Amino acid sequence: MAVGSGELPKMFPVQGFQLATGCAGIKVPGRRDLVIMALAEGAEIATVFTRNAFCAAPVQLAKKHGADSSQSGKGVRYLLTNTGNANAGTGEQGLKDALQTCASLAAIAAVDVEQVLPFSTGVIGEPLPIEPILAALPTTFSTLDENAWAAAAEGILTTDTRAKGASRQIEIDGETVTVTGIAKGAGMIRPDMATMLAYVATDAVCAPQDLQQILNGAVNKSFNRITVDGDTSTNDSLVLVATGQVDVEPIHSKDGARFVEAIEQVCIELAQAIVRDGEGATKFVSVEVAGGASVAECLQVAYTVADSPLVKTALFASDPNWGRILAAIGRAGVDGLDVEKIKVWLDDVLIAEGGGRALSYTEQAGQQVMDQEELTIRIELARGDIVETVWTTDLSYDYIRINAEYRT
Amino acid sequence: MAVGSGELPKMFPVQGFQLATGCAGIKVPGRRDLVIMALAEGAEIATVFTRNAFCAAPVQLAKKHGADSSQSGKGVRYLLTNTGNANAGTGEQGLKDALQTCASLAAIAAVDVEQVLPFSTGVIGEPLPIEPILAALPTTFSTLDENAWAAAAEGILTTDTRAKGASRQIEIDGETVTVTGIAKGAGMIRPDMATMLAYVATDAVCAPQDLQQILNGAVNKSFNRITVDGDTSTNDSLVLVATGQVDVEPIHSKDGARFVEAIEQVCIELAQAIVRDGEGATKFVSVEVAGGASVAECLQVAYTVADSPLVKTALFASDPNWGRILAAIGRAGVDGLDVEKIKVWLDDVLIAEGGGRALSYTEQAGQQVMDQEELTIRIELARGDIVETVWTTDLSYDYIRINAEYRT
């Protein structure tokens, strides 16, 4: 299941950023499960990774290689992604395996091993099958192409039912600047830093510290605002690349805000696409918490509602069982919550106020909103003026099926 | 579904504690949905209630009546329970309705209204149907009986598939002291103070402050250590009664510890019975976290594992997908976790150490444990010597069915 049409939008190529997709047969023979991305010399990169303490071997190595190649001044040149195996919970051997795939690609591409960052996604706790990956690298490498975004968007998927991409072009100082990105992820989704895997690239010039700042800001409006099942992955990784092939530096121009906005929009579109393709999803739900005294308490309430199995099963049933929403708000752990002042809406239908059902509420009005494929649960806390929104899905039989049968 | 045989054990009557079950037809015509419990004059009572900010009208009123009757010195004489409607999220009207049911029972029993504590469980956010309750009170009242524990255990159920009871008799100073209790609850179970509804009674003498202290201790070993879906209810209430009909005061005798232990055992047995009857449960799982630096961090890890939808679906599938357990531990938010030192067992099978799969581990050994109906996930953090255990279930298709169809 998935929400919305899900067609990949037009993916504008990014100058100085090539992609190639290959077939190593890691989990399913014949499946495209290997993606190489090549960055032009001089490209800058910003990254965010999972905060899960059991972060995967490729995450550990990508952090190290990123730091090393920045220090040497040579910069990152390749991103190597495999699906079908997360190389997480694999200890020392996992680090060796990840390093070997990087070394092999580095040899083919004639760069230093530190210039290659590894990414893995798939089952946790099984050794990375290294031979088929090494065998598939040369052929895959030979097909690098600036117009291969759509194929790469397919190549990074696991339990996803469809490819996820977003793309923007903006004019800055008479030059066309492109921002294009792809992402994967459908389950184990409640990013604490980034989503499972996402890659965004622009051909504009951007200094590394600016790039990292833009990325951190964008992440907190996108990937750090979604949840499918509350389970933060061991492999979450997000990369933002600026190839510098188009000769403008937007962030230090009068159009800086538009550039930041374009990157944010691409990140939001990708993050929402992950939720729309959430495992077993039949609904796309925005949980908007307004009137909070802090960002933290807004998110606390929003995530408690968004991750509540009882709220999620009611959403699956299209049942306006708003009592479950109140119960979730009440247990979110916000100190001194005045339930008399809290209001809750389904879209524009006021359902609860004064600690109970709104006088104007009718079951029919609630049902009408619930029958929609997309809806907003809006909560007013009346404690301040902070507003935060998170996006989530319902909890369906298919979520159970997908995750109970995952390894069979 | 439910785990284990689930037969009600022998329920020893408690002197000075009578029960009666009636039929108000609140949600389902003909269903036993009304329970009155009568406490002998002079009985002492201790209570714990939900910490959910949206606590239900009966919870608010039970707290108030408890305080008032203690102040007047008259004491609580009746506990009035209805199922089929939680009278939660019902605002001012909910409080009036709860008060009216108490007033009606008080009139029949010729006591003050403050001597009656109300309890409700069922759907949230719908007005309490007061007329059928008032109509059923007199007949129900006329059947009060010390030997009616089993019928009352049936009478307080909602989505539960079976009655839950526990009973102990111990000899103290030559007198037989009885501790008997019943509980209900299957979904919206992650008590923050008590479970949905549980009543435990003893016929020994016990002063109120002693009784409350015993109850607080017992709750933290039982009802505050279980989770079905992480959703804390609006109506959790637990009552411990000491009728004082047997003329010993165990807590101030040399047998004080055995008395406390008997109450704890009854509470643990009831709490575990709720998990075994968890909505859609096919497995009963103990999550034991050892080697913690504090109770808080042990519980943080234990609940993150116990509430993870991915761990729970793997349990449902009997899939030893231990990578999901590692991922849950890693995202539990414990600062400075050294993943190299963490060990994880399924029963006695070591599955993970040193950040990856244990060398001695075989899929067959893991599978053998997973195939059992009851199993323990044991986690060693190697940071201290605190041990905490929580009990939980798997997440199955039936959980979705029960909660998606709840109001239909």
Image (spheres, coloured by chain):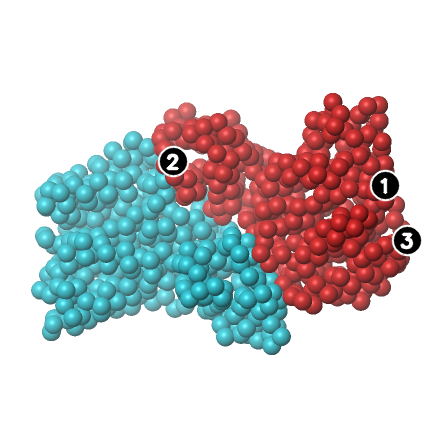
Chain colours: A cyan, B red
Q: Under tag 1, what secondary structure?
A: loop
Q: Are marks 1 and 3 on the same chain?
A: yes
Q: Which residue is mark 2?
A: B337
Q: Nearer the viewer, mark 1 or mark 2?
A: 1
In percent of the image, x 23 and y 56: which residue is there? Answer: A213
Give percent across and percent down for residue A200: 24, 58
Image quadrant assignment for residue A328: bottom right
Q: Are marks 1 and 2 in contact (CB under 8 Å)?
A: no
Quickly name the residue at label 1: B16
Give the Cα distance between marks 1 and 2: 52 Å
Identify the residue at horizontal 82%, vertical 29% (top origin): B248
Viewer-nearest residue: A353 or A167: A353
The crowding category of the residue bearing disc 3, from other C-alpha atoms within 10 Å (few below 14, some 14 to 19, many at least 20), is: few
Instruction: Tell me the SS state at disc 3.
Output: loop
Marks 1 and 3: CB-CB under 8 Å? no
Q: Amino acid at mark 2?
A: Leu
Chain under callout 3: B
Residue at disc 2, secondary structure: loop
Q: Answer yes or no: do the residues labelled 2 and 3 have beta carbons within 8 Å? A: no
In the depicted structure, whether residue A238 falls above or below residue B286: below
Camera-nearest residue between A40 and A31: A40
Viewer-nearest residue: B358 or A35: B358
Task: Find residue B57 and report its image quarter.
Answer: bottom right
Nearer to us: label 1 or label 3: 1
**Is residue A54 toward the left or the right of residue A309 in the image?**
left
Q: Residues within 10 Å of mark 2 (few under 14, many from 20)?
A: some
Q: Is residue B270 left or right of residue A32?
A: right
Residue B5: percent from left, percent from top: 70, 38
Residue A265 lies, with reference to residue B216, above or below; the image says below
Return the disc, 1 or 3, that comes first in the chain's sequence.
1
**Residue density around tag 1, few if under 14, some if 14–19, many if 20 or more, within 10 Å:** many
